[in-house]
Image (tube, helix red, strand yellow):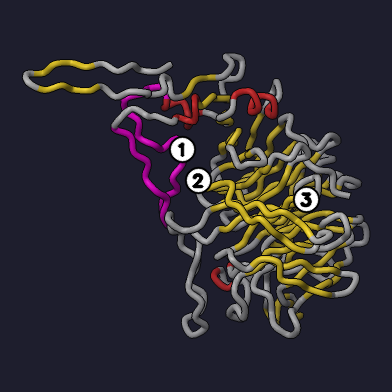
Amino acid sequence: MYFTLVLAAFGCGLVTAQTGVVNPLVQVCNTSLPKVLCINKYVAVMPYHFFREVSNGSYLSVFGSTSVPNDTSFGLVNKADFLVFDRKRGLDLLGPNPNYELAFNVSAAVHEAPVYVRSQNKLYFSQLAPPPGYLPQLVIDLNEDPPSLSEYLSDPPVYAPNGGTFHNGLIYWGASGGNNSIGGTEQRVGVRTVDPETNKSTTLLNNYLGYYFNTVDDLVVSANGDVWFTDPQYSWFNALTDTAPQFKSATYRFRPSTGAVNLVEDSLIQPNGIAISPSGKTLYISDTGAANGPILASIGPQGSPFNATGKRTIYAYTICDKGTSLLNKRPIYLSPDGVPDGLKVAQNGYVVTGAGAGVDVLDEDGTRLVRVQTNFLVQNFAWTGKDLKTLWLFGQGGIGKVEWNLQGQELK
């Protein structure tokens, strides 16, 4: 698999051949699964001269766009649906017949906050900007063959859900929009629930002692009913709120039974995805500070351009003090493909994140095991099905579906 050291005499000097190169860099794992590609030794040593451009506002860098002229096997990368980095664990989580397909073509708007309601076999999710002010949400009916996509509106409507989960029979949405005239009513950033059986929505939280939250980007509910949520500043950058941020970005724990809100983390630039391990002992938060923008009310929202040298990191924390606080912050993953947006933990403890044009599966320590490649930017995802082994992917321009052996946590 490796080139050995070769010395050749040229006149008075010696020319040293490159050593240690992984050869081939990639190969089909199993000829019966041509869309599943094994990445040998994480391509730890590539043959010179190789180069990968960084992403910017008009160009998305993907692994397959790396120029590797001296290894013809690398051309297979862009043709694969699944990239396997850890052969044993990766092939096990994919199962014998993994499949990816594009289920729906949708607008270039951000599609977020997917929540699976098992009793109905339906997927509820949102469409955010562009354009700002879009109010109806969307629902996929999985009872139909093929599944159908239609608009959905709760009563009263929820503006700009950006993160979602299911708990105790209710959809929990992080409502990221703030405006005094949406749907004829005022709405502010906060936490809302929707009863999927009655279609009624309820506001659980819309302020911190009089101040507006920034975004409430993503949320998760712990076993005791506490809502942990991230509060970056993207609603201002993307014109989903009419008020400039009043606080720095942070992560909070909210206890609906008392109304109390506690700050639990304020060191990240733009906290985004959030998830809890099945044991309830570890919390994961992604920092997507590589996508950032100015906060000047005088000039208004200016977007959040991507800076490749900014934060695009997933951190793990130990949940302690009877589930009320966080300790032992440690970085576990640097996303090479855009920012790690949506974040969830599978039933076996593997961490899954939507990043760039695809989804990464990591072990608990942040080692990448598998990447699912898509042709659209993935913002978030949700497990569905009787055995929770179907993963629906949501993003800009597409909605995809993965069938594999990786099971999601059952949300009750």
Q: Which mark is residue 63?
A: 1
User: Residue 112 placed where, x, y %?
Assistant: 67, 56
Q: Secondary structure at mark 2?
A: loop
Q: Please name the residue shown 49% across and 80% down the image.
A: 296
Horizontal arrangement in the rendering, residue 167 relative to residue 3 (left or right): right
Residue 354 is inside the magenta segment: no
Query: With respect to residue 15, does 252 lie above or below?
Result: below
- In three-dimensional space, the C-alpha distance between marks 3 and 2, rounded to whole angstroms, equals 28 Å
Span highlighted in magenta in the image: 49-73
Would you name the residue on which mark 2 appears?
337
Q: Please name the residue shown 52% across and 61% down the image.
A: 289
User: Residue 288 placed where, x, y %?
Assistant: 55, 58
Q: Please name the residue shown 61% across and 62% down the image.
A: 271
Query: With respect to residue 197, does 370 lie above or below?
Result: above
Q: Please name the residue shown 82% across and 74% down the image.
A: 260
Would you name the residue on which mark 3 appears?
281
User: Residue 93 placed where, x, y %?
Assistant: 69, 29
Three-letter amino acid code of the residue under disc 1:
Phe
Three-letter amino acid code of the residue under disc 3:
Lys
User: Is the residue under label 1 in contact with that under label 2 (CB below 8 Å)?
Assistant: yes
- In three-dimensional space, the C-alpha distance between marks 2 and 1, rounded to whole angstroms, equals 7 Å
- In three-dimensional space, the C-alpha distance between marks 3 and 1, rounded to whole angstroms, equals 33 Å
Q: Secondary structure at mark 3?
A: loop
